Image (tube, rainbow, N blue to C red):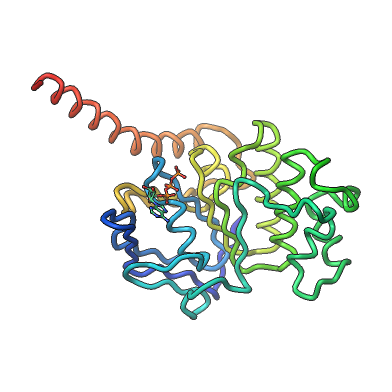
């Protein structure tokens, strides 16, 4: 099963981002077809969130350009929604009213429909404060999807959830992506999560794309030998560098 179809492509062309003296991204070029589910992985601080913020239009590249659906990304777009690690619900608004924020027309039925899609229609009148972390994150997902986005950006949205809730959320996100056919870009530390969800995994290292692989596994994905093959492939690529660094560190220690 794949959502990939002709249409709104996300283009990232020779994008660099510098903060002061620090080159965080260096000449990143990437074309993401409409409907593809892409996961971005890499060590802490490698620039994953920076890239996602550029795609979201929350920041501008130092060099290069980004476009979606043939128009340049300059600022926040109506067709793009983002989920963060924390749900960012307004505590003074009930669940349904938080979701309504995401509905262009402000239509309450559309908000209730989105709540139904995440299995929380019966909690519509609850305040965020009485919901669990997983439920709050589902409300945030409903708010994002209530706007029928073409592009959904996910910045480690499941990072704070317990293991079981995390797996349930992964399945929910995968099902909604399959139904609604938006393009998804997920930043995650969890290689297993990347292999479970993505059509394609991008590894960022030293501000550049170090690996770009298609996960050619059927969906829904079982944690079988094929799954482990991809998981190992990506992890080994990340760990090679750790071993390199370690041997350099040892050599330096001897020199001292
Ligand atoms: N607004 C900013 N000003 C200065 N430096 C920044 C800014 N945003 C990010 N950085 C720096 O850019 C680098 C990459 O940050 P980024 O958050 O993109 O990494 P990341 O791969 O998402 O990390 P993590 O996995 O830990 O969330 C870091 O060194 C960070 O300190």
In this view, which residue lies farthest toward the bottom?
71
Look at the picture and state if 135 lies above or below 209.
above
Q: Whole-percent x and y of residue 169?
A: 69, 43
For residue 164, side relative to residue 58 (left or right): right
For residue 74, side relative to residue 125 (left or right): left
Q: Residue drawn 15% across and 21% down?
A: 253
Q: Residue drawn 23% across and 32% down?
A: 244
Depth check: 120 or 18 in front? 18
Depth check: 152 or 215 in front? 152
For residue 104, side relative to residue 14 (left or right): right
Q: Whole-percent x and y of residue 46?
A: 37, 47
Look at the picture and state if 114 lies above or below 225.
below
Look at the picture and state if 182 lies above or below 154.
below
Q: Whole-percent x and y of residue 168?
A: 71, 39
Residue 220 placement: quadrant: top right
Q: Residue drawn 40% across and 35% down?
A: 235
């Amino acid at each position: 099963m794949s959502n990939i179809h002709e249409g709104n492509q996300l283009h990232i062309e020779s994008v660099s981002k510098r903060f002061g003296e620090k080159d965080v991204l260096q000449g990143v070029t990437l074309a993401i077809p409409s409907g593809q589910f892409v996961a971005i992985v890499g060590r802490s601080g490698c620039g994953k969130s920076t890239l996602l913020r550029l795609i979201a239009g929350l920041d501008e590249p130092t060099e290069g350009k980004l476009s979606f659906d043939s128009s340049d990304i300059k600022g926040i777009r109506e067709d793009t929604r983002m989920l963060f690690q924390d749900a960012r619900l307004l505590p003074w608004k009930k669940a349904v009213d938080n979701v309504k924020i995401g509905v262009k027309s402000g239509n309450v039925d559309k908000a209730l429909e989105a709540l139904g899609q995440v299995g929380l229609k019966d909690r519509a009148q609850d305040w965020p404060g009485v919901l669990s972390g997983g439920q709050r994150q589902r409300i945030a997902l409903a708010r994002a999807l209530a706007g029928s986005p073409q592009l959904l950006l996910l910045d480690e949205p499941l990072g704070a959830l317990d293991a079981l809730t995390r797996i349930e959320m992964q399945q929910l996100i995968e099902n909604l992506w399959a139904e609604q056919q938006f393009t998804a870009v997920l930043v995650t530390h969890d290689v297993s999560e990347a292999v479970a969800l993505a059509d394609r995994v991008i590894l960022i290292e030293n501000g550049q794309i170090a690996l770009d692989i298609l996960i050619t596994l059927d969906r829904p994905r079982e944690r079988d030998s094929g799954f482990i093959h991809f998981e190992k492939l990506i992890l080994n690529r990340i760990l090679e560098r750790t071993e390199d660094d370690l041997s350099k560190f040892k050599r330096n220690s001897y020199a001292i």
